Image (spheres, helix red, strand yellow):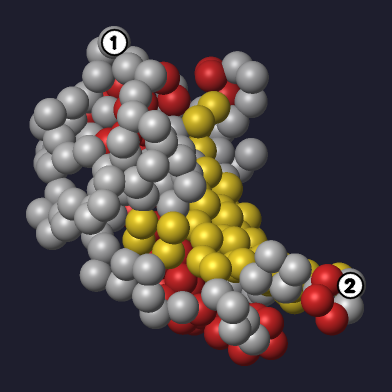
Amino acid sequence: MTGCTAQAPEGDALYQDGEQRFTNMWDAMHSVLSAVHDGEWAVPVGGYGAAPGACTASSSEGFRFEYRRSWASDDLDPQAISDAAVAAFESLSLQPETNVFGEGDQEEWNVIAEGDPVGRAVVTVRMDLQTVDVTTLTTCAPGDPVALDAMVFDDPDMSSEAWRRMPATERPDSVPMFFFPVDGPVFWNEDKTPVDPQPVITDPPQAPFGP
């Protein structure tokens, strides 16, 4: 968990560090998504990636981000998708590896890349489900995830519905969001179905924790 033993920032410095780490990861993975499928991706509930999580059971060990995206199609070409993912990761100066398991309709392709700013990223093609799943788990960073979460969601009461304020889709024109005020746009209905149409965000809410 590289970085967790460094001096942990607090307050505005913690927010700014978290925002920079998230944005760098988001931008890098956005380029991977666009290379694989230049269209809309689904973001599973809670998978947007901006909610800081603890690196271990103890929040004192630092924070990291977990990111998930998915795309379904009836006409997947796993070799083309793998080649596109590999090229995208290489453009980020990473060295991806590709593993293939199973055969025919049961094939599963995994393109794995490790290193900053993505941490550990995996592009998985499942031919039986006709889906492409993209996940990222960033490396550990010093700082209190609980304190950072309260700033990201501007919610001292730690509302259990903070997930509703994170986008349910990512498109080629999407921009990264790292501040979700309680009066900001809502992307999910209470029954955990995406709001349709999704709010179009071109100028994300700005947090009061900047320099």
Q: In which quadrant is the C terminus drawn? A: top left
Residue 2, relative to residue 173: is it above or below? above
Q: Nearer the viewer, residue 174 or 23?
A: 174
Q: Earlier in the sequence, mark 2 or mark 1?
A: 2
Q: Callout 2: helix, strand or loop? A: loop
Image vertical order of residue 57 relative to residue 74, above or below = above
The three-letter code of the residue at mark 1 reads Asp
| Residue 46, image x, y percentages | 45, 38
Identify the residue at image location x=13%, y=59%.
Answer: 202
Dot 1 alpha-carbon crowd within 10 angstroms: few under 14, some 14 to 19, many 20 or more: few
State the mark number for residue 7: none
Is 78 on the left-hand or right-hand side of 85?
Answer: right
Alpha carbon separation for disc pair 2 and 1: 47 Å
On the image, which quarter does residue 101 sit in? bottom right
Q: Is residue 55 visible?
A: yes
Q: Residue furthest top?
A: 157
Which residue is under mark 1? 157
The secondary structure type at the circle numbered 1 is: loop
Give me the residue at 32% from left, 17% from top. 159
Q: Position of residue 162 (x, y in %)?
A: 33, 28
> Residue at left 15%, top 49%?
204
Name the residue at 37% across, 75% down: 39
Give residue 125's quadrant in the image.
Answer: bottom right
Amino acid type, residue under disc 2 in the picture: Gly
- The label on residue 102 is 2
Q: Position of residue 167 (x, y in %)?
A: 31, 48
Q: Quadrant of the N terminus?
A: top right
| Percent coordinates x, y for residue 83 in the rendering | 62, 87
Please state which of the two labelled residues, at mark 2 or mark 1, is closer to the viewer. 2
